Image: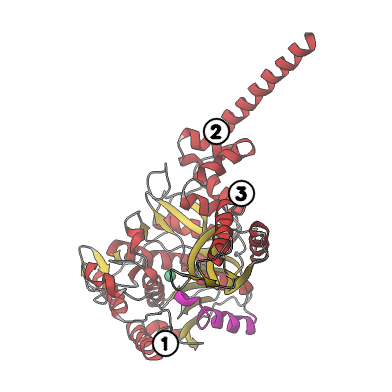
């Protein structure tokens, strides 16, 4: 009796301690990791109409990567000629090289040869305009029209705003007589939309050959978002500190075929379908990778009480948090390697048994998993020797995660604090692929951020209909690029 009483008392005490710790951790959440007051910042004085027209001219030019080919050499030549004409100082005072298939590498030599350089990245190519959706564009996608406070056109967001704003910022800084202390590279790939083989990868090979090791590269892949993070109001500066890996796996089943009047118990289609059902039912395990914990640490002060309690007490409520995140496609993509069954082909006629059935499954790999661990998972879950598993040619391991307290993120944080004071900076995992991951061999940190604003509506414009960037956002890109160069190399 007495023993039971003691155990019960101990349990109540323990529960009290747990509740106390949970509440204390929730209430004692540190404040925002946003940038302090905007000290030491003087915006460029821009002739805004001129600056916007220079950008709009670049949007008019076709630099399209298709499924078959990167932009043509002629299209890239015309784009380069336009940039040289619009940004004469940059082209006169910096070293300009063409690398691979029309990729551009600008070198702005710093005075301190010992300081690790900084690379600002962007890409010249765009995706095509889908002919079937052409009539749903409210403006001509190749007009570069400036209307309703927006520069409209394919590539305005992805990624010419970044590319042209970097050159504009450098042109303005040169005009002011700015000389960087450490070397700045501007590296503009030509085939990012096709994986970067003839653009970014060629530039990286050249930098490697020259023994360059940069402190950081800054590429696209993050932005100011508003309304994209459930439960959080206002702008967030989402900065990509890592990106997921990629592998597609082909599953195939061979069978004897024959007449459908006397079928075997399972056809090739049945065998393959069973394998696919198993893969969807048993996905790779979910977990909070360092990218997710970094994001939640930054978001915690902004979250409603119950969500804050979960993210601040991951030691106890981590499982609940993962369970909640797993319920939405975007949350799920944050916490696990995703399984997407994307193609299925089999059969030729209703009364003929198929001799082959094939399907493709696309995996986006969470940092910590690997191409090898995905393949092992696939074979173990299917557990059927009749199904052949073949990985596709395009494979990327997940990128390393850049340090949350590294020099790179501190520079980005400082610049955001000056150009857009008070906006919280949130490190996160980029679930799509960018050129930045190619730079791992030649840089210590890879970060992904371009300072335009994305909402649930405007994010659809990426690769979509009515792509365009508000003029105010483009001007902000120029100010950000200039201030980032000053902070990094001034
Ligand atoms: Zn892009």
Q: Which residue is mark 2?
A: 26
Name the disc covering residue 375, or none: none
Q: Nearer the viewer, mark 1 or mark 2?
A: 2
Secondary structure of the residue carrying numbered label 3:
loop
- Does 202 appear in magenta? yes
Q: Is residue 337 visible?
A: no
Q: Earlier in the sequence, mark 3 or mark 2?
A: 2
How far from the left and from the top, in percent, is residue 486? 47, 67
Q: Which residue is mark 1?
A: 92
Q: Which residue is mark 3?
A: 287
Do the residues bearing badges 3 and 2 touch, measured as CB atoms within 8 Å? no
Residue drawn at (43%, 48%) of the image: 229
- The answer to whether residue 90 is left or right of residue 60 is right
Residue drawn at (71%, 15%) of the image: 9
Real-space Cα separation, disc 1 to disc 2, in angstroms: 56 Å
Secondary structure of the residue carrying numbered label 2:
helix
Real-space Cα separation, disc 3 to disc 1, in angstroms: 51 Å
Task: Tell whether circle 1 marks a residue whose Cβ is less than 8 angstroms from ligand 1.
Answer: no
Magenta region? 192-211
Do the residues bearing badges 3 and 1 touch, measured as CB atoms within 8 Å? no
| Quadrant the N terminus occupies | top right
How far from the left and from the top, in percent, is residue 389? 63, 68
Front position in the image: 380 or 294: 380
The local crowd at label 1, few if under 14, some if 14 to 19, many if 20 or more residues have their Cα within 10 Å, is: few
Residue drawn at (49%, 58%) of the image: 239
Q: Residue furthest front?
A: 261
């Amino acid at each position: 009796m007495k023993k039971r009483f003691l155990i019960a008392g101990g349990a109540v005490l323990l529960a009290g301690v747990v509740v106390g710790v949970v509440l204390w951790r929730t209430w004692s959440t540190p404040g925002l990791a946003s940038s302090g007051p905007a000290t030491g910042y003087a915006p460029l004085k821009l002739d805004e109409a001129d600056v916007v027209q220079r950008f709009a001219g670049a949007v008019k030019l076709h630099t399209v990567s298709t499924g078959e080919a990167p932009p043509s050499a002629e299209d890239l030549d015309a784009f380069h000629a336009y940039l040289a004409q619009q940004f004469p100082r940059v082209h006169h005072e910096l070293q300009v090289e063409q690398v691979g298939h029309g990729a551009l590498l600008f070198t702005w030599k710093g005075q301190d040869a010992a300081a690790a350089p900084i690379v600002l990245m962007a890409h010249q190519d765009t995706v095509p305009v889908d002919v079937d959706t052409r009539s749903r564009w409210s403006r001509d996608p190749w007009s570069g029209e400036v209307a309703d406070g927006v520069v409209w056109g394919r590539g305005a967001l992805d990624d010419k705003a970044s590319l042209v704003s970097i050159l504009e910022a450098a042109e303005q800084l040169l005009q002011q007589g700015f000389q960087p202390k450490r070397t700045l590279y501007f590296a503009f790939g030509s085939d990012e939309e096709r994986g970067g083989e003839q653009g970014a990868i060629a530039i990286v090979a050249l930098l490697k050959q020259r023994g360059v090791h940069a402190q950081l590269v800054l590429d696209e892949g993050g932005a100011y978002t508003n309304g994209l993070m459930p439960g959080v109001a206002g702008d967030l500066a989402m900065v990509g500190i890592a990106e997921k890996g990629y592998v597609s796996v082909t599953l195939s089943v061979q069978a004897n075929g024959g007449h459908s009047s006397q079928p075997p118990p399972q056809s090739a289609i049945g065998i393959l379908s069973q394998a696919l059902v198993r893969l969807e039912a048993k996905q790779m395990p979910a977990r909070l990778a360092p990218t997710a914990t970094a994001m939640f640490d930054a978001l915690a002060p902004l979250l409603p009480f119950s969500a804050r309690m979960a993210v601040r007490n991951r030691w106890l409520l981590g499982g609940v948090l993962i369970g909640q995140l797993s319920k939405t496609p975007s949350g799920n993509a944050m916490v696990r390697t995703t399984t997407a069954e994307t193609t299925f082909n089999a059969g030729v006629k209703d009364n003929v048994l198929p001799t082959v059935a094939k399907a493709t499954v696309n995996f986006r790999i969470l940092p910590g998993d690997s191409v090898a661990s995905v393949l092992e998972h696939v074979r173990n879950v299917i557990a059927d020797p009749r199904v052949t598993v073949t990985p596709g040619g395009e494979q990327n391991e997940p990128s390393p995660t850049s340090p949350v307290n590294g020099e790179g993120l501190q520079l980005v944080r400082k610049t955001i604090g000056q150009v857009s004071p008070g906006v919280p900076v949130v490190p996160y995992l980029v679930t799509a692929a960018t050129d930045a991951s190619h730079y791992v061999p030649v840089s210590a940190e890879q970060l992904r951020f371009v300072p335009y604003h994305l909402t649930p509506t405007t994010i659809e414009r990426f690769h979509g209909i009515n792509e365009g960037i508000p003029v105010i956002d483009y001007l902000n890109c120029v100010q950000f690029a200039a201030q980032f160069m000053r902070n990094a190399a001034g």
